[in-house]
Image (spheres, rainbow, N blue to C red):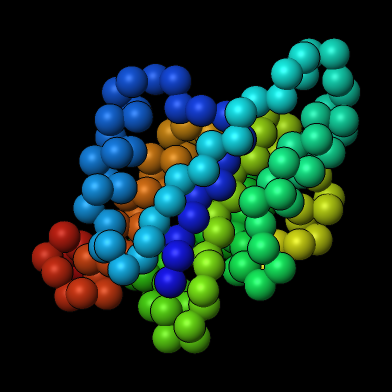
Amino acid sequence: MNIILLCIGKTDETPLEELILKYEKRLPPHWNYQRIEIPDIKNRKNLSESQQKEKEAELLFSKIKSDDRVILLDEKGKSLSSVKFADEIGGMLNQSVKRLVFVIGGPYGFDKSIYARANQKLSLSAMTFTHQMVRLFLTEQLYRAFSILQGKAYHHE
């Protein structure tokens, strides 16, 4: 399976980038993990919120394939425990999902066309975090899911 983290903008805070890389390196090679960062839209201050979301949607769609399983990181998404998240990842592995794409949108969220394309919405918390922090949290949870699926001692329950 290929697991892709697709996000708008780059991580510009060095300490966060280092932590993200730490967990990315721990992910198993057979997951073929890849982080794809789409550059912020130029002159976005001259665009309305809906125009920004439409442009971001175009850029996101250019990276999403028709048979991808797409999960949006969204505050209104489903909340899962780490064990349930691991179970879902394990289920997708068993279903032979080829590409699992997690998507982190821009500052205003997602265009309605992205919501329509998504297979699922996932919330990491009811609290609000920076999009850069969400990358870290998701990457750590992917590593935790791998550890849980392997029966390793990283997760204590």
Q: Which residue is drawn at 38% across and 40% down?
A: 136
In which quarter of the view is residue 39 placed? top right
Residue 55 placed where, x, y %?
80, 35
Residue 36 placed where, x, y %?
51, 43
Quarter of the picture holding the N terminus: bottom left
Residue 53 placed where, x, y %?
79, 36
Looking at the image, is 96 positioned above or below residue 128?
below
Q: Residue at x 80, y 61 (%)?
A: 116
Q: Residue at x 56, y 47 (%)?
A: 6
Work out whether residue 91 can be spotted: no
Looking at the image, is 64 positioned above or below residue 8?
below
Looking at the image, is 62 positioned above or below residue 80?
above
For this orientation, the residue located farthest to the bottom is 95
Q: Nearer the viewer, residue 137 or 27?
A: 27
How many marks on residues?
0
Q: In this view, does 57 lie to the left or right of 155?
A: right
Q: Is residue 116 left or right of residue 88?
A: right
In which quarter of the view is residue 137 placed? top left
Work out whether residue 97 can be spotted: yes
